Image (tube, helix red, strand yellow):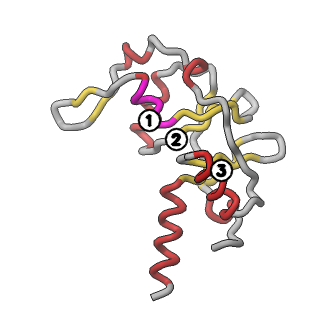
């Protein structure tokens, strides 16, 4: 596992959101795509920040619907501006960086995801703690 490159495990062409989009799009994307980390980009696709499900929950608590699902009030979300709530200290790596490096950076900085960017800082992939755990699980099962 030590020599695995991020290009081999990353989710390619991840969902991103433009920094100028309305804040309510964050909740919509999280719910429709069943994801918890969203790279925020400029018009050129260059990474500007990250917003996570945890960040969203700190800003606006979801309400429980009659069917048991949790939903965000779109009217409540219109009160917020995406630019003001994006985590702007973004750690990122390139596709040719190793999984070992990603795990080290993620562990040291308590990150749930690692955006993968090209030389122009455009988002080309993402890997998450969950992706790494599944890879670890696969490795454990192969050793039986």
User: Which residue corresponds to mark 3?
Assistant: 125
Residue 33 drawn at (x, y percent): 45, 43
Assign a secondary structure to mark 2: strand
**Residue for point 68% across, 42% down:** 91
Give the residue at mark 2: 37
Outermost residue, left side: 66
- The majority secondary structure of the magenta stretch comes to helix
Q: Residue furthest top?
A: 79
Question: Where in the figure is residue 127, as x and y percent of width and height?
Answer: 59, 53
The N terminus: image quadrant = bottom right
Circle 1: element type:
helix
Q: Is residue 105 above or below residue 1?
A: above
Q: What residue would you read off at disc 1?
A: 54
Quadrant location of the C terminus in the rendered image: bottom left
Mark 3 residue crowding within 10 angstroms, few (<14) / some (14–19) / many (20+): many
* Whether label 1 touches label 3, CB < 8 Å: no
Marks 3 and 2, the one that precedes in the sequence: 2
At 70% from the left edge and 59% from the top edge, which residue is drawn? 101
The reply to whether callout 1 and callout 2 are in contact (CB within 8 Å) is no
- Which residue: 75% across, 59% down? 97
Q: Mark 1 or mark 3, which is nearer to you?
A: 1
Query: Residues in magenta?
Result: 52-58
């Amino acid at each position: 596992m030590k020599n695995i490159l991020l290009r081999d495990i990353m989710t390619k062409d991840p969902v991103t959101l433009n920094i100028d989009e309305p804040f309510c799009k964050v909740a919509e994307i999280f719910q429709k795509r069943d994801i918890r980390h969203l790279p925020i980009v400029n018009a050129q696709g260059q990474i500007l920040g990250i917003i996570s499900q945890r960040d969203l929950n700190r800003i606006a608590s979801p309400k429980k619907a009659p069917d048991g699902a949790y939903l965000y009030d779109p009217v409540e979300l219109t009160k917020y501006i995406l630019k003001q709530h994006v985590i702007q200290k973004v750690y990122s790596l390139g596709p040719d960086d190793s999984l070992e490096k990603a795990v080290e950076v993620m562990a040291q900085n308590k990150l749930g995801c690692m955006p993968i960017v090209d030389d122009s800082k455009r988002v080309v992939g993402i890997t998450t703690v969950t992706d790494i755990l599944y890879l670890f699980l696969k490795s454990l099962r192969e050793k039986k």
